[in-house]
């Protein structure tokens, strides 16, 4: 199999087809930004993008990423090392507390804004309903998405 992660191609043995993507990302590639929360597809902490679509890497097997392009939070920053506008907005409005949910939130927000650059409040809330946060109460996260989209608060 061939799996591209953050623009880098990796050859992966066929006999690993049933292994979980999150373990490949964290253990093989050492990309620990992708968090393992519930491990059963319920919390969204492990969210990555596969060909631009949100996927829960804790329940996604490697064969589902074969030939695809995976984006993790480590791939978000700009080539010059500065933060992606969505990351900067999270910082600016205080949408990060413990930070455990943040990588998954960022990738969910990115997928939303790429599909819908000017989402309504309802569309933002709907997009994030599968991402749990124990700290922020969600309002700052939604505010950060609006800021990154250029929508007045
Ligand atoms: S760790 Fe994957 S959904 Fe919770
Ligand atoms: S910032 Fe702590 S779980 Fe969201």
Image (cartoon, rainbow, N blue to C red):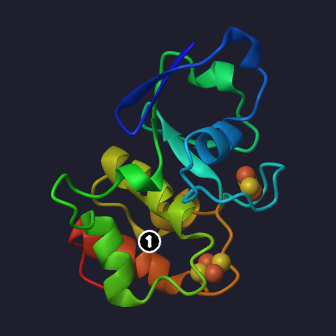
Q: Is residue 85 left or right of residue 133?
A: left
User: Is the residue 115 above or below the residue 92 in the image?
Assistant: above
Q: Nearer the viewer, residue 61 or 134?
A: 61
* Viewport quadrant of the N terminus: top right
Residue 58 pos. (x, y %): 73, 44
Q: Which image quarter holds the C terminus?
A: bottom left
Q: Is residue 126 above or below residue 14?
A: below
Camera-side residue of 129 and 29: 29
Q: Closer to the camera, 34 or 128? A: 34
Image-quadrant location for residue 35: bottom right
Q: Is residue 104 left or right of residue 18?
A: left
Q: Position of residue 141 (x, y in %)?
A: 47, 77
Q: Is residue 142 left or right of residue 1?
A: left
Residue that carries the numbered disc 1 in the rendered image: 121
Q: Position of residue 118 (x, y in %)?
A: 28, 60
**Residue drawn where x is 52% and y is 63% of the image:** 103
Tell me residue 112's x, y (percent). Answer: 42, 53
Q: Quadrant of residue 91?
A: bottom left
Image height check: is 144 above or below 137? above
Rendering quarter of residue 74:
bottom left
């Amino acid at each position: 199999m061939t799996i591209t992660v953050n623009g880098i191609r990796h050859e992966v043995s066929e006999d690993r087809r049933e292994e979980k993507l999150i373990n490949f990302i964290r253990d093989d590639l050492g990309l620990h930004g992708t968090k393992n929360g519930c491990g059963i597809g319920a919390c969204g902490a492990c969210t990555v993008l596969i060909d631009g679509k949100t996927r829960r890497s804790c329940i996604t097997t490697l064969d589902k990423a074969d030939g695809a392009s995976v984006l993790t939070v480590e791939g978000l920053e700009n080539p010059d090392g500065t933060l992606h506008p969505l990351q900067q907005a999270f910082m600016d409005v205080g949408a990060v507390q413990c930070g455990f949910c943040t990588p998954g939130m960022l990738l969910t927000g990115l997928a939303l804004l790429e599909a819908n650059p000017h989402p309504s409040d309802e569309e933002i809330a709907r997009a994030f309903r599968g991402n749990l946060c124990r700290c922020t109460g969600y309002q700052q996260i939604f505010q950060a998405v609006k800021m990154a989209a250029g929508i007045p608060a």
